[in-house]
Image: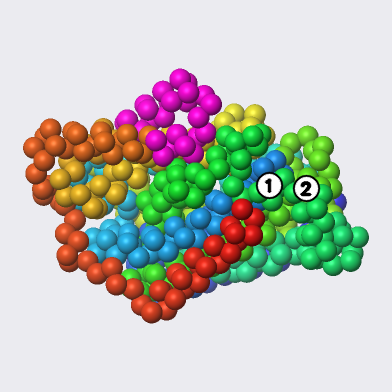
Amino acid sequence: MFSTIDYVVVGVYAVTLFLLAQWVSRERAGHHKDASDYFLAGKALPWWAIGASLIASNISAEQIIGMSGSGYVIGLGIASYEWMAALTLILVGKYLLPIFLKRNIYTMPQFLEQRYDHRVRMVMAFFWLGVYVFVNLTSILWLGALAIQAVTGFDLVYGLLALAIFAAGYSLYGGLKAVAFTDIVQVVLLCFGGFAIAYVILQDVSGHTGVWKGFSMLMEKAPEKFDMILSPDNPNYKDLPGISVLVGGMWIMNLSYWGFNQYIIQRALGARDIGEAQKGIVFAAFLKLVMPIIVVLPGIAMFVMNSHLSSPDEAYPTAMKMLPAGLMGLVFAALIAAIVSSLGSMTNSISTIFTMDIYPSFVKADKRRDPVVVGRIVAVLAMVIALVTAKPLLGNFDQAFQYIQEFTGFFTPGICVIFFMGMFWKKTTASGALAAAIGSAVLSFVFKMAWPGLAFIDRVGLVFLLCVALAVVISLVEGGKEQRGAVDLEDISFKTSGGFNLAATVVVLILAALYATWW
């Protein structure tokens, strides 16, 4: 369990992060923090902050604890969520970011109003608020508190409170700037801690004869855990249905998350310019390639060492207990870093959507308060709601990561249809977009009830195609004319730098090698 030196390491991390956040959030004399400063970091983020913040926001308790749990049950196949995300990021940087930055937007709902109408903006704004608070924020808090309890023995309630207070304390004043500029520290700590635990656990597996020997022994003792493309007779096929992870519904899941998710894309919207945003995207793509070492490998190793854990999500916390004093504190600090970074990012995105999309629609201009003040109040309220609802919503799931993917899979097909058709088909109407959004949830529910054997990733792909057809039919019935807010692609340059193109090629080659090795 935790020793004095472990507590000292965690304490030093917490104090350092808090002070750093306050330092980067400071304002020039006479300058008043406005909405652009608070929600988009003054549109001055450099590439390294964008890339680090993308990963720090993404890799949290739901990834580290949840994906390690899925690695324990499924194996390396779950790494497809990470590796395919690297390629998805490249596509987002080349084809989607130029459109968003050209529109000079703060939020995804704002783009939807520019392209469609106010109804679409409001529907999606309220939807995202609900998902961010009751799915994402609650899962980060709950799994983080579980990890704290497993490693230190702290009561769950105290763990939840400590995470919420700490995350609010370091991010509330500075907003996105505080989150993004401290995330480079968070990512360094996360990677160092993740590689440290992988090193220790592989050494233990090999009997201290070497890391590569330990990895080879994992493949020898549990070869079924190293199948990237699962066969239909695999007991976990329903979670990862074979080739669909490469050509099916996982693309819809990834594009929705990395391309149309306020929580993620907000970092790129705060870039100095398109070139800086694309460099940050490439940086994040390379980091995603190594993430399975941190979030999947410990789960596989724990299966080999202890295949009788009471819950798969105990795999990572159990692995942490194997670490020596001091190093355990460092790895625990890395886990806390991932959790509080995601909490800070999530609450900032929640406050951005409420303040920029919902608040102006219900409060007259002469009665509105300072948007920065409103944003801070909303961030606190969101955290309080998540604290209260975390246990009732997530207390009964043993693979929280799979629960999150399954739930979001009800809505991602419609989200992708709304954005893709809004960007690339000028005749898509607002009614067609709303039909796709509503149809996504309805069709997903119908298929889940009527066809329970259908893998949810396949369901996502099928529902996406049906929602495209629905949006097309309704748009054509309404006249099939070019819409007033249609995106003029001729005014947008999709040309990327030589460095971006080279990086994209390297990512593709690495992915091809990985899948060829563990097909």
Determine which quarter of the picture holds residue 118. top left
Question: Mark 2: which amino acid?
Answer: Ala
Residue at 65% x, 65% y is 191
- Residue located 43% across and 25% down the image: 447
What element does badge 2 sit on?
Answer: loop
Badge 1 or badge 2: first in the primary sequence: 1
In the figure, residue 393 lies in which quadrant?
A: top right
Q: Is residue 154 left or right of residue 137?
A: right
The magenta region covers 438-462
Report the mark closest to the observer, 1 or 2.
Answer: 2
Query: What residue did someone put label 1 on?
Result: 75
Q: Position of residue 329 (x, y in %)?
A: 77, 60
Residue 26 location in percent, x, y? 46, 71
Dots 1, 2 in contact, CB < 8 A: yes
User: Does the image show residue 324?
Assistant: no
- Decide whether the magenta segment is chiefly helix, strand or loop: helix
Q: Say whether residue 195 is visible.
A: yes
The tally of labels here is 2
Q: Residue at x 14, y 37 (%)?
A: 476
- Which residue is situated farthest in the bottom direction here? 498
Asked which secondary structure carries label 1, the reply is loop
- What amino acid is labelled 1 in the image? Gly
Q: Which residue is mark 2?
A: 222
Up the image or down, 102 lies above or below 400; here it is below
Q: Is residue 67 above or below residue 459?
A: below
**Observer-nearest residue: 197 or 443?**
443
Q: Is residue 1 left or right of residue 246?
A: right
Whether residue 343 appears in magenta in the rendering, the answer is no
User: Percent position (x, y) of residue 106?
Assistant: 31, 57
Residue 41 location in percent, x, y? 39, 66
Of 248 and 20, nearer the camera is 248
Residue drawn 69% across the image and 67% down it: 192
